[in-house]
Amino acid sequence: QVQVVESGGGSVQPGGSLRLSCSASEYIFRMGCMGWFRQAPGKEREGVAAIYTGGVTTNYANSVKGRFLVSQDKPKNTVYLQMNNLGADDTAMYYCAASYIVGGCPLYSNEYHYWGQGTQVTVSS
């Protein structure tokens, strides 16, 4: 069964950290790229980070470089997004998605084919 499931969202104070997890079926995980996206109310969905599951290539949005880290656990078919030094602007629904693209992973949502339901991240004092 085709499946992508995110977890790990929650509420955190500014400056705090969260780690999101994305578990996928083996078929999905091995397709090519796994990406993290987010969408805040009233805003367009934006790409945050992506990783090529067939190698080590990663890609980050400028807004999260140096704060977020995308990684993978291949035996578990799972991708992680470690988010540090969170700010109010990071508040959004975070989605994990899979793409058939191999190698350089884009951060454009229309390049991704399978999506999870999302997990909410709220940064507030």
Image: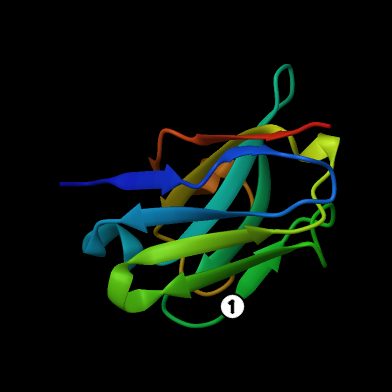
Q: Residue 75 versus residue 97: which sits nearer the camera? A: 75
| 105 on left or right of 79 | right
Task: Note whether 43 is above or below 60 in the view shown.
Answer: above
Residue depicted at x 29% and y 77%: 75
Task: Note whether 50 is above or below 10 in the view shown.
Answer: below
Residue depicted at x 83% and y 36%: 89
Q: Toward which corner of the image does residue 104 lie, by quadrant?
A: bottom right
Local packing at callout 1 (Cα closer than 10 Å; few below 14, some 14-19, many 20+) is some
| 15 on left or right of 37 | right
Task: Note whether 110 is above or below 50 in the view shown.
Answer: above
Q: Residue 99 versus residue 89: which sits nearer the camera? A: 89
| 28 on left or right of 120 | left
Q: Toward which corner of the image does residue 84 lie, by quadrant?
A: bottom right
Please state which amino acid type lies under the numbered disc 1.
Thr
The quadrant of the rendering that contains the C terminus is top right
Q: Percent from the top left, x then y, of residue 80? A: 52, 62
Residue depicted at x 41% and y 79%: 54
Say which residue label 1 marks.
Answer: 57
Q: Percent from the top left, x then y, of residue 65? A: 81, 63
Residue depicted at x 41% and y 74%: 73
| 52 on left or right of 67 | left
Q: Percent from the top left, x then y, of residue 49? A: 64, 58
Could you say whether the residue bearing mark 1 is in a helix, strand or loop?
Answer: loop
Q: Percent from the top left, x then y, of residue 19? A: 58, 56
What is the residue that sits farthest to the bottom in this orientation? 55
What is the residue that sits farthest to the top in this orientation? 42
Task: Note whether 12 is above or below 107 in the view shown.
Answer: above
Whether residue 31 can be seen here: no
